[in-house]
Image (cartoon, rainbow, N blue to C red):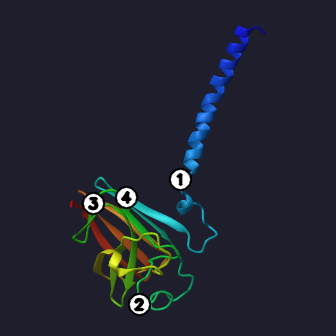
Amino acid sequence: MNFKQALILAMVVFSCSAPKEEGKAVVNEHEQHDHSAHSDTSNSKSPRTASMANIGSNHVHIDYSAPSVRGRHIFGGLVALDEVWVTGAHSATTISFSEDIMIDGNIIAKGKYALFTIPKEKSWTVILNSNFAQHLADDYDQSEDVLRVEVENIESIEPVEQLRFDVTSAGNENGELAFYWSNRGFLLSLSKGTI
């Protein structure tokens, strides 16, 4: 093999291996993203899941752990009434907005928040807190709240076995966030907001 043939062979080998290396870099970059929140957690009794929708151009994303009733007495039993609750299990439920948003008439800046609630006999206090990296409500600090709104309780006709949040668009830059579990729930109105 002469020098010219060796040079051509080296160029062919290099050009064939370059895309593979580039593709590998893309795969490795993708692996660096945190997929644990949405991975298959079928063995978990409270799998991590998400609900999301666009309200106009605003991407609303809620991430939560979804426990099931499994025959337990939930509100006033497993979940105490009149106390701050993580509104799920394990880590705090989080909600994020890609743009400013209006929630039940209150303007909230774009960003990520913890969503806590205080379930009551006939109503709920829904709380957005700036400290979204919390386990349960152990580190909850009311001074970090950015929203507290009172909403009425919605009684479920059929019991909801697994805790569920739904974000839905109603068109015209409006939508809602719904929560259901066991025999209770609440709704929050969402719309385009500007600060």
Q: Which of the marked residues, 2 or 3, is nearer the chain's N terminus?
A: 2
Question: Which part of the image, by quadrant, shows the N terminus?
Answer: top right
| Label 4, label 2: how far apart the Cα atoms are | 30 Å
The spot of residue 51 in percent (x, y) is: 43, 63
Within 10 Å of disc 2 (Cα), the crowding (few <14, some 14-19, many 20+) is: some
| Label 1, label 3: how far apart the Cα atoms are | 25 Å
Query: Outermost residue, right direction?
Result: 1
- Choose top left, top right, bottom left or bottom right for residue 102: bottom left
Residue 100 image label:
3
Question: Which part of the image, by quadrant, shows the C terminus?
Answer: bottom left
Q: Which of the marked residues, 2 or 1, is nearer the chain's N terminus?
A: 1
Residue 3 drawn above or below residue 33: above
Residue at 58% from the left image edge and 35% from the top image edge: 22
Residue 30 drawn above or below residue 106: above
Residue type (three-letter) at the residue carrying disc 3: Asp
Image depth: mark 1 or mark 4 in front: 1
Asked if the residue at tag 2 contacts the one at tag 4, i.e. Cβ–Cβ closer than 8 Å, the answer is no
| Label 2, label 1: how far apart the Cα atoms are | 37 Å
Residue type (three-letter) at the residue carrying disc 1: His
Residue 33 image label:
1
Q: Which of the marked residues, 4 or 3, is nearer the chain's N terminus?
A: 4
Query: On the image, numbered disc 4 is attached to which residue?
Result: 53
Residue type (three-letter) at the residue carrying disc 4: Ala
Query: On the image, numbered disc 2 is attached to which residue?
Result: 81
Under circle 3, the secondary element is: loop
The spot of residue 127 in percent (x, y) is: 34, 77
Within 10 Å of disc 4 (Cα), the crowding (few <14, some 14-19, many 20+) is: some
| Label 1, label 4: how far apart the Cα atoms are | 21 Å
Residue type (three-letter) at the residue carrying disc 2: Leu
Can the viewer see residue 132?
Answer: yes
